[in-house]
Image: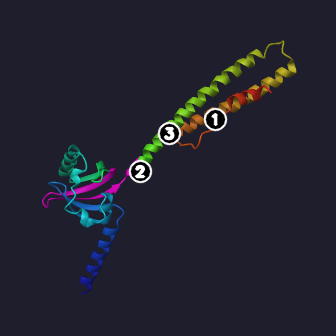
Amino acid sequence: SQTTEALKESLSNYRYLYESALSGIYQTSIDDGTFISANQTTAEIFGYKSVKDLIGKCKFSDLYSQEERIKFLNILKKNGVLNDCEIHATLMDGREVDLLINARIFQKKGYIEGAITDITKLKKLEEELRRKNAEMEEFISSVSHDLKSPLFSISGYTEMLSDPGTNYEKKVEILGNIQRNIKEMSAFISGLLDLSRAGKVIGDISDLPIDSLINSIFR
């Protein structure tokens, strides 16, 4: 009948989506965490070539701490669901991975059903981003300190150059150069600090020739 054919087609479509999903989809026993069913993505996440190698042979509960498992089970039994839970697991082959779990519990049927995503690369990228930002902030702090020192010195020179004994034309020229470069250096420092507050990552860093910059003022 048409209804039967439509049902078969629907089941076929579901099976295709299940097997080709980018996230792992699984069922595990509530009692000991043994995998009851899973798609191919789940098998690959846990280091198995096929679902057949995973089912009945691997216990999810053996891959992370029992303390965490008890905590997660309590949440599931209380709320019925577990949302966006991160687990750090050690696989059977020794690899360490970070996993994102969403699950629901079927206590009467004795299993947990869920979706699992390997976020190991994402966690490493987040750590690298934090490290780069820390390096950037340290760089900006150092450059700001190094630039402010000559700025204070230059400001002192402007007072010294106010001495009436200095040639008027030369005095005006030097003062103009100093004031112009002070503004440029201050703008540079402000830009660096703004960049740090924005939390952006900068690329390769090259040395700033502070001595040459200062010497150019007095040319």
Mark number for residue 207? Answer: 1
| Residue 122 falls within the magenta-colored stretch | yes
Nearest the viewer among 206 and 186 is 206
Marks 3 and 1 sit apart, C-alpha to C-alpha, by 18 Å
Instruction: Return the disc, 3 or 2, that comes first in the chain's sequence.
Output: 2
Q: Write the residue at 34% across / 65% down.
A: 21
Q: Which residues are magenta?
A: 95-123
Q: Write the residue at 34% across / 61% down.
A: 23
Residue type at tag 3: Asn
Left or right: 123, with 51 as reference point: right
Q: Which residue is mark 3?
A: 133
Front label number (1 vs 2): 1
Front label number (3 vs 1): 1
Q: Which residue is mark 2?
A: 122
Q: Give the image location of residue 54, x and y in percent.
A: 24, 62
| Residue 116 falls within the magenta-colored stretch | yes
**Mark 3, secondary structure of its residue:** helix
Nearest the viewer among 124 and 17 is 124
Q: Is residue 192 above or below residue 153?
A: below
Residues at discs 3 and 1 in contact (Cβ within 8 Å) = no
Colour convention: rainbow
**Mark 2, secondary structure of its residue:** helix
